Image (tube, rainbow, N blue to C red):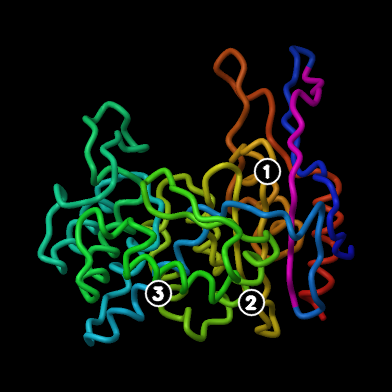
């Protein structure tokens, strides 16, 4: 399936709901854009050049830029520290403990974080705190790496500060010059880039090179990257480097049986994470990249029981067949 430049969005996932007779109907349809890059070039559904705020899908690139700063001072991090610094975590106990350890490397504590105070995803009954924010690991890594350039506190999030100029330039090395730089949910700069650039970037992460440390750390600590029930954690356990972003963005990279790198990026136009997740697991399962059943989309319920699901579209499954053929060559 060739890349179609300038194409409109296409159906990538649909949600179903059944009646008492067990017969299901499609209740909602999600449209978006998908790009897969491999040895034979790009394949796309929709517009591969769609300018996309990649949000947290950029964290592996941001973490690499931070590690390269720390290299100047010969500061080496453990894999668990790199993983939590690349994460969008659930706020579970092991996540918070890892953030505390990384902060301690900078001589800081949870109150020094530059994230807004929120309740953890894993337990909304807990009082809001800065460390519960899903980006607290990234901000802890920012604090440690930013100190190399003398950046501290609010300066760490200023796109005009030397530290963020370094991080944004590091992301641009992978994705190209940003189409725009905006404020992310955590307060840090977030870039907009062509969706195809994100897919190519994830193929680079899968290949290793300058990204070997973040790749290996993520694969070694899949729970720290996401958490209980998260798709990216399930994919990492299967050897696929995966990172979602807010508003229906998801990116992944893997090596095929010939050790050739592949990358995938999706953007759901309506911002629905369920659409991006269903599309990704549907494509990777159908393409044979991961085992069937490694992760199941959350059930759509009625009366407290499962009555439907969110599933990848027919077009996505056709693209998966092309990917399967390409990976087998």
Q: Is residue 105 left or right of residue 300?
A: left
Task: Give how far apart the Cα atoms at labels 1 and 3 are.
Answer: 28 Å
Above or below, comparing residue 115 to residue 253 in the picture: above
Q: Is residue 222 left or right of residue 231?
A: left
Quadrant of residue 206 in the image?
bottom right
Where is residue 265 drawn, in percent x and y? 66, 59
**Residue annotated with mark 2:** 255
For the C terminus, which image quadrant?
Answer: bottom right
Could you tell which of marks 1 and 3 lies nearer the N-terminus? 3
**Residue annotated with mark 1:** 268
Above or below, comparing residue 48 to residue 19 in the picture: below
Q: Nearer the viewer, residue 187 or 307?
A: 187
Where is residue 154 drawn, in percent x and y? 24, 53
Where is residue 204 drawn, in percent x and y? 59, 77
Secondary-structure class at tag 2: strand
**Residue annotated with mark 3:** 65
Secondary-structure class at tag 3: helix
Task: Give how far apart the Cα atoms at labels 1 and 2 are.
Answer: 25 Å
Which residues are the magenta region? 22-38
């Amino acid at each position: 399936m060739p890349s179609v430049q300038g194409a409109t969005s296409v159906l990538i996932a649909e949600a179903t709901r059944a009646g008492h007779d067990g017969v299901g109907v499609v209740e909602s349809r999600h449209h978006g854009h998908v790009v897969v890059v491999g040895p034979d070039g790009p394949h796309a559904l929709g517009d591969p050049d769609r300018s996309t705020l990649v949000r947290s899908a950029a964290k592996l690139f941001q973490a690499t830029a931070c590690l390269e700063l720390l290299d100047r001072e010969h500061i080496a991090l453990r894999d668990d520290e790199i993983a939590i610094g690349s994460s969008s975590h659930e706020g579970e106990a092991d996540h918070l403990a890892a953030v505390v350890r990384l902060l301690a490397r900078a001589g800081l504590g949870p109150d020094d974080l530059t994230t807004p105070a929120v309740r953890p995803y894993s337990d909304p009954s807990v009082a809001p705190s800065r460390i519960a924010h899903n980006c607290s690991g990234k901000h802890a890594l920012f604090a440690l790496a930013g100190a190399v350039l003398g950046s501290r506190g609010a300066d760490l999030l200023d796109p005009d500060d030397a530290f963020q100029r370094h991080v944004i330039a590091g992301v641009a090395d992978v994705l190209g010059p940003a189409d725009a730089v905006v404020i992310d949910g955590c307060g840090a700069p977030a870039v907009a880039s062509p969706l195809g650039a994100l897919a190519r970037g994830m193929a680079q992460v899968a290949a290793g090179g300058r990204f070997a440390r973040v790749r290996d750390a993520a694969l070694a600590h899949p729970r720290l990257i996401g958490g209980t029930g998260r798709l990216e954690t399930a994919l990492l356990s299967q050897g696929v480097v995966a990172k979602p972003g807010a508003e229906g963005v998801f990116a992944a990279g893997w090596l095929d049986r010939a050790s050739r790198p592949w990358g995938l990026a999706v953007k759901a136009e309506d911002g629905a994470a369920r659409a991006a997740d269903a599309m990704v697991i549907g494509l990777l399962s159908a393409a044979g990249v991961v085992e069937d059943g490694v992760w199941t989309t959350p059930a759509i319920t009625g009366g407290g029981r499962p009555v439907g699901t969110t599933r990848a579209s027919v077009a996505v499954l056709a693209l998966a067949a092309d990917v399967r053929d390409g990976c087998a060559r």
